[in-house]
Image (cartoon, rainbow, N blue to C red):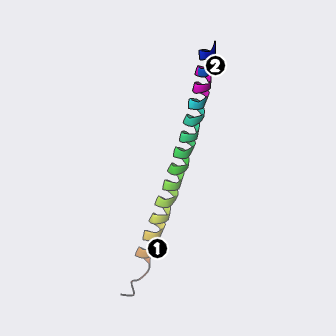
Amino acid sequence: MKTIGYLSDRITLLVLLERMVSKLLLMAKSQKLMLMNYGKNYLIDLSEKPSDI
């Protein structure tokens, strides 16, 4: 009976870890999108402004 409890503890740990990882991946994805949008806007701003050089 001990092994069953041990296994279920292991499974719950794995599930929690998987959830955390997927949350982190989602966050990273959204951050990446934000950064990409920021970069695009920055480039557009640069191209629209007349160069002072």
| Residue in the picture at 53% in, 55% down | 31
Residue topped by disc 2:
5
> How much space separates mark 2 and mark 1, taking CA atoms?
60 Å
Q: Which residue is mark 1?
A: 45
Residue sitting nearer the eye, 8 or 21: 8
Q: Which amino acid, by three-letter code, is at mark 1?
A: Asp
Residue 23 picture location, percent across and down: 57, 43
| Image spot of residue 17 (x, y percent) | 56, 36
39 versus 21 height, above or below: below
Categorize mark 2 by other alpha carbons within 10 Å: few (<14), some (14-19), many (20+).
Answer: few
Please, what is the dominant secondary structure of the magenta stretch? Answer: helix
44 left or right, relative to 24: left
Q: Secondary structure at mark 2?
A: helix
Q: Which residue sits at x=56%, y=30%?
A: 14
Range covered by the magenta-colored residues: 7-12
Give the quadrant of the N terminus.
Answer: top right
Whole-percent x and y of residue 34? 52, 58
